[in-house]
Image: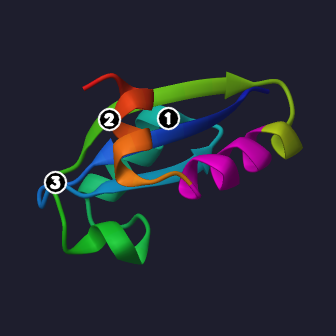
Amino acid sequence: MSHHVYVLECADDSLYTGYTTDVERRVDEHNAGEGAKYTRGRTPVSLVHTERFESRSAAMSREYAIKQLSRREKERLIDY
């Protein structure tokens, strides 16, 4: 099983970072209003970045690291 960290761009131009084992399903959930509370009022969302990991712990560590980045650093990561 692969583990993924993803970054979404929300309708209000904010960025959301999350973890999943199925990126396509998770993006669909966010767009259906069934994802994280943060994204529910900010749909539609679009996928702008993903990273794949072999272990859940590595993915969760990376998710935390990305969440600590400034907006400018996140934009560099997703190569705006």
Q: Residue at x 25, y 54 (%)?
A: 31
Q: Mark 3 or mark 1, which has the lower sequence index?
A: 3
What's the residue type where badge 2 is placed? Leu
Q: Please report contact status of discs 1 and 2: CB closer than 8 Å, yes or no.
A: yes
Q: Which is in the foreground here, disc 3 or disc 1? A: 3
The quadrant in which the N terminus is found is top right
The residue pinned by badge 2 equals: 47
**Which of 8 and 68 lies nearest the eye of the viewer?**
68
Choose top left, top right, bottom left or bottom right for residue 10.
bottom left
What's the residue type where badge 3 is placed? Asp
What's the residue type where badge 1 is placed? Val
Disc 1 on helix, strand or loop? helix
Q: What stretch is highlighted in magenta?
A: 59-68
Choose top left, top right, bottom left or bottom right for residue 67.
bottom right
Which label sits on residue 23? Answer: 1
The alpha-carbon separation of the residues under discs 3 and 2 comes to 12 Å
Where is residue 63? Give x, y as percent.
64, 48
Residue 65 is one of the magenta-drawn residues: yes
